[in-house]
Amino acid sequence: MLAELQYYCYTAFMQEVISITDRGTLTLPASIRKELGLTGGQQFIVLTTPEGELLLRPAATIPLEIYSEERICEFAEEDQEIGKLLK
């Protein structure tokens, strides 16, 4: 039973040996990228597990705009104008 479980664990997942460059770059093999539907430009979060393993998870990036005081004043003025129209 244990041998069957070990065999499953080693064959149920795609495995490839990759290297890390001096600059820290890793290249995911084409077979894995194809199986997972990964394309260039996607971002990932890299996590480490207590067991010392690396885990990659897709990252969701959301554009963020930081408003200047001037822009905030514009919003307030527009709100006031809309408030007058709605009365």
Image (cartoon, helix red, strand yellow):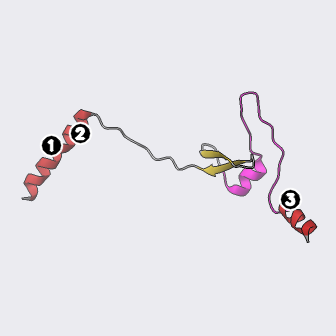
Quickly name the residue at label 3.
10
68 relative position to 44: left or right: left
Earlier-in-chain disc, 1 versus 2: 2
Instruction: Report the magenta stretch's main SS.
Output: loop
**Pointers 3 and 2 in contact (CB under 8 A)?**
no
Location of residue 45 in the rendering, given as x and y in whole percent from the top left corner: 61, 46
Q: For the residue labelled by badge 3, is the local secondary structure a helix, a strand or a loop?
A: helix
Alpha carbon separation for disc pair 1 and 2: 9 Å
Mark 1 lies on a secondary structure that is: helix
Q: Which amino acid does label 1 sit on?
A: Glu
Residue 37 located within the stretch drawn in magenta: yes
Q: Residue at x 50, y 47 (%)?
A: 61
Q: Quadrant of residue 6?
A: bottom right
| Residue that label 2 marks | 72
Q: Are marks 3 and 1 in contact (CB under 8 Å)?
A: no
**x and y percentages locating residue 30 in the rendered image:** 76, 48
Residue assigned mark 1: 77
Tell me the quarter of the picture where residue 28 sits.
top right
